[in-house]
Every structure is written in C-alpha cells, then in structure tokens.
Image (cartoon, grey):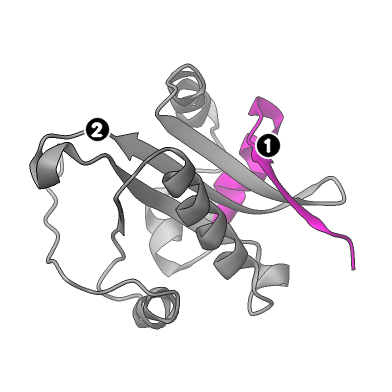
C-alpha cells in the first residue's frame, strides 16, 4: 500500500475535497459539488491566512482525506493559543483503516508545534461513531456547542 503524505491542499484538490465533504448524510444536505465557485472563494481566503491550515492526505497522488486546522490566539486560559479542527473527512475507500486517526494526530502535533495549549473540535450530535472515534483519540466531550445560522 502506498504511503500517505499529509500536505497543504492546493486549488486543484478542491473537487476531491468537496466530494468528501458531501459524501455523507449531513454533507449531502449542505454541500454542492456541482458548483465549486463558493469553495474556490473560501480557498483563496484560507490560502492567505497563516492561521488556517487546509490539508489533504495524499496516497500516490490521490486525495483520500482532508481537514482544516485553525490556530486561534486568545486571552482566556492565561493567554493560551488554541486550535480548532474542522471538516475531518476520509474518502469512502479509506474508512476504517486508520487514516482519520492519522489526520487528527497530525493536527494535534501541528498544534503543539504552533504553541497551542488546547485542541478543540465539534461534532454534530448525530455522529455518534465520530464521537467514539474522538474519545478513542483522547478528546473529551466537555462542552455543549451552539450555532446561529446567518
């Protein structure tokens, strides 16, 4: 099996990234792989922000996973910098083989390298398998998240 490389996402990776975002029950209702325009606009904003890391897992030139890591400086917790993991997705053909863990472990190590003292993420309440996955990786379900759609 070809080795996985975790690297910065490139503009040409967007079709594969968006396809993975859309490839589940929740994603199918909120993503639009047929029109990449809003994703291209978002990518341009991410690409110039040093606190945003959009990465892909690449196996032999094929994008098989992705996540976004955001570095957030703050005042709370004695001025602690934290990171937020978002949009963790693994291609259907790769699920159950440890790639998700590899991606999240990369994000945790990168957070350490960036001086973060806390790594946080949210997961939709309906994704109970994902909750167990994150707990196995050492995350604790310590907070209740809220959203306001704009």
In the rendered image, the vertical position of residue 103 relative to residue 101, given as above or below:
above
Q: Please identify the quadrant where the C terminus is shown.
A: top left
Q: Where residue 86 sits in the image (x, y, percent)?
A: 39, 50
In the rendered image, the vertical position of residue 18 relative to residue 72, given as above or below:
below
Question: Mark 1 highlights which residue?
Answer: 13
Looking at the rendered structure, the secondary structure element under dot 2 is loop
In the rendered image, the vertical position of residue 102 relative to residue 20, given as above or below:
below
Range of magenta residues: 1-20
Seen at 66% across and 29% down, the residue is 10
- Residue in front for this viewpoint, 44 or 107: 107
Looking at the rendered structure, the secondary structure element under dot 1 is helix
Of circles 1 and 2, which is in front? 2
Seen at 56% across and 54% down, the residue is 106
Q: Where residue 99 sits in the image (x, y, percent)?
A: 65, 67
Q: Where residue 111 sits in the image (x, y, percent)?
A: 43, 46
Q: Quadrant of residue 130?
A: bottom left
**Does 63 sit left or right of 69 as displayed?**
right
- Residue in front for this viewpoint, 76 or 14: 76
Question: Mark 2 highlights which residue?
Answer: 73
The tag earlier along the polypeptide, 1 or 2, is 1
- Neighbour tally class for label 2: few under 14, some 14-19, many 20 plus, Cα within 10 Å: some
- Residue in front for this viewpoint, 111 or 93: 111
Residue 17 visible to an observer of this rendering: yes
């Amino acid at each position: 099996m070809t080795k996985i490389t975790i690297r910065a996402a490139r503009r040409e990776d967007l079709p594969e990234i968006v396809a993975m975002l859309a490839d589940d029950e929740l994603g199918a209702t909120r993503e639009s792989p047929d029109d990449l325009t809003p994703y291209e606009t978002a990518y341009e904003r991410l690409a110039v922000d040093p606190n945003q890391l959009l990465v892909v897992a690449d196996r032999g030139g094929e994008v098989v996973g992705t996540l976004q890591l955001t570095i957030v400086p703050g005042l709370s917790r004695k001025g602690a910098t934290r990171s937020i993991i978002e949009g963790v997705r693994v291609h259907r053909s790769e699920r159950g083989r440890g790639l998700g863990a590899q991606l999240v472990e990369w994000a945790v190590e990168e957070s350490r390298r960036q001086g973060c003292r806390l790594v946080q993420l949210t997961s939709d309440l309906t994704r109970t398998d994902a909750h167990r996955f994150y707990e196995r990786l050492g995350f604790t379900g310590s907070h209740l998240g809220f959203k306001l759609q704009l």
